[in-house]
Image (cartoon, rainbow, N blue to C red):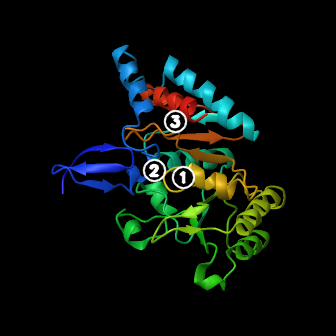
Amino acid sequence: MVFTHGRGSRTYDRDGRAYLDFFAGAGALNHGHNHPVLKRALLDYLEQDGVTHSLDMLTAAKEDFLTEFAARVLAPRGLDCRVQFPGPTGTNSVEAALKLARKVTGRQNVVAFTGGFHGMSLGSLAVTGNAAKRAGAGVPLGHTWRIPYDGFAGGRVSGLQLLDGMLADSSSGMDLPAAVVVETVQGEGGVNPARLTWLADLAELQHSGEADHGTGPPVRGVAGRTRPAAHRSCGGRAGARPGVGGVLPGAGHGQEGRCRGLRPRTARGDGGFPRRGDEGHAALDHHG
C-alpha cells in the first residue's frame, strides 16, 4: 500500500482509495492533513521568502507565535512560563525536560511509572517501561525508579503510597529524585487513562514532597505521548500543575512543532524552524 496524498482525516492510495487516518502522525497532524488554513499560512510564508531555518536566532514568525501562545494558552490558565523549543519530536521534548530537572535539582534519578512510553532516545527509554523498546538501546538504562501506574496489577498495588513511603523513609534506598515523569493518558497497548483522583493524589504528593522531601518539580511526559487535549481533560481537571510540561501547538504538514512550557521562569530557547511558528499562529487564530 502506497499513499499519495492526504486531506483532513483521510489519506489516499495510488488507486484513489480513501482511508481514515487514525495515526494522524502520532498527533503531529492534530488538525488533519493539509488543513486549508494552515496550508495557506505556510504557502504565504514561503512566497514571502520567510526564514525557513534560523537555529537559535529569533525571527518575526517565532516572536508572533510566542506572543499569541502566551496570550491565548498560558495567560488564561495562569501559567507563568517561559517557552522552549527543544526539537521536532516528542523524545526531544522529554530529554530536554529531564536535563532541565536534573540541572535545577542537582540530582540524577527520576521517578517513572509502569506502562509508560516517552520516546526512543536513551534518556526517554530509561523512563519507558516496555522491555522490547528498552532493549533497543543496547546499553544499560539507569537512574530511574519505577513505580506502579494507576490500576497496575488490577489495582492491588498502590504506587503512590509506595512512593510516598519510600521518599519519607531514609532507609528505603531511594535517593531523592530530580523529577517525576508521568503520562495522564498512557497509549501503550491501548488507551490507559489515569483516574482524576489518582492524578490529584500525585499532584498532592508532589506539592507536599517539595516541602517534606525536596522532590523537586514533576516532569509531565506529554510531548510525544500524551496529547495536550488529554492533559486539559485529565491533568488540568485533577489540579496537576507540572514544573515542566509539553505541548504540541499543531504545526501540521508532518512538522511536529513541539514546545515545552517551563515553570517557573527558568529558561527559554528557540528552535530552528520558524515556519512552524507561522502555522502555529494561524492555528491559534483559526481555533480562537
**Is the N terminus in the top left, top right, bottom left or bottom right quadrant?**
bottom left
* Residue behind mark 3: 85
Side of 69 relative to 24 (left or right):
right
Real-space Cα distance between discs 1 and 2? Answer: 7 Å
Disc 1 to disc 3, how far (Cα)?
16 Å
Q: Which of these two is toward me, 282 or 109? A: 282
Instruction: Give the SS element for disc 3.
Output: loop
**Residue 19 place in picture, x, y as percent:** 30, 56
Whether residue 143 is visible: yes
N-terminal label among 1 and 3: 3
Q: Inspect the image, locate mark 3, and give the three-letter code of the amino acid beneath it.
A: Phe
Can you identify the residue that label 2 sits on? 27
Q: Residue at x 34, y 64 (%)?
A: 136
Residue placed furthest toward the top: 48
Rendered residue at 64%/73% (across/down)? 150
Residue 51's disc number: none
* Residue type highlighted by circle 2: Gly
Kind of residue sitting beneath label 1: Arg
Q: Which mark is residue 227?
A: 1
